[in-house]
Image: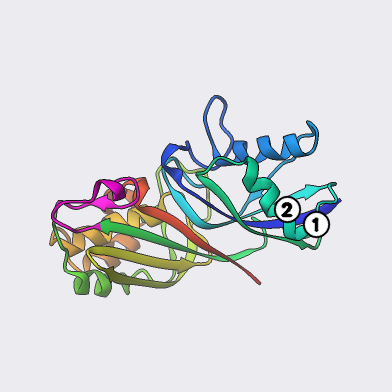
Amino acid sequence: MRRLKGIISYDGTHFSGYQVQPGERTVQAELERVLAIMHKGEKIKVTASGRTDARVHATGQTVHFDTSLAIPIEKYGKALNVQLPRDIRVLSIEEVAHDFHARYNVTGKRYRYIWSCEPIQSPFRRHYTVETNGVKPNVNAMQQAAKAIIGTHDFSCFCAANTSVKDKVRTVTALQFEWHGEELHMVIEGNGFLYNMVRIIAGTLWEVGIGRRTINNVALVIASKDRNQAGKTAPPHGLYLEKVFYS
């Protein structure tokens, strides 16, 4: 048996998230369906660095699985892509040590959140950016407020209330905003993220940008550890898992 590590990209528009769910179309289910075909009906479990929600995209999700097939490593990705649906692509495949684990060995992740600030959003971007109806926020204020988020904190305020995770301490190592034409991108890196954490941060900083929340309020929200003090959870289709880091 060989353990293979794959970098995959997917358009989350028509998926109910990454993780297998009964009766739902998911990324994991599609990957495992194709691997079962390749392995003559044998079930092959695919483990990812973490789950993504319905309509959330990935440009650099990491997975691992074990295989008994003797397909040359340079041809394995092509063998998968030939049978996978077009909204999932395997970008690379490599053989790794048997103790490599796509989830437990993660040292950090990078996410990207995108708003479309053009007066009329292109219909071709409607599934991939969040429309603001032409509103352009004060990005300088958003960047100033983001300083309170960088560092190690209890991020209970930026975690969905229905999570079962007890330890909500995480470290955000970078958070910056970039203009790409009429699109505003928020790029955030950290050692780990709680359920809906990036989307709640995006929603909170957006409120700073449009004047509904002060720059100094963000630090108070973090100190409160109260989800009700933070902003709304931003829509899922603006979010991308961009890169997963390993030591």
Is residue 125 a member of the stretch shown in magenta? yes
Q: Residues within 10 Å of mark 1 (few under 14, many from 20)?
A: few
Give the residue type at disc 1: Pro
Is 46 on the left or on the right of 116, as rendered?
Answer: right
Callout 2: SS: helix
- Residue 1 placed where, x, y %? 86, 50
**Which segment did they paint magenta?**
116-133
Query: Which labelled disc corresponds to residue 163?
Result: none
The answer to if 200 sits in the magenta stretch is no
Point out residue 89 in the picture as x, y percentages from the top left corner: 56, 50
Looking at the rendered structure, which numbered label has been put on residue 72? 1
Residue occupied by mark 2 = 76
Asked whether the viewer can see residue 100, the reply is no
Q: Measuring 43% from the left and 56% from the top, which residue is drawn there?
A: 240
User: Which residue shows up at 70% across the image and 58% down it?
Assistant: 5
Q: Would you say residue 88 is visible in this rendering?
A: yes
Which quarter of the rendered picture does the C terminus lie within? bottom right
Q: Which quadrant would residue 245 be assigned to in this image?
A: bottom right
Residue 153, quarter of the rendered image? bottom left
156 lies left or right of 45: left
Magenta-drawn stretch, dominant element (helix, strand or loop): loop
Pointers 1 and 2 in contact (CB under 8 A)? yes
Amino acid type, label 2: Tyr
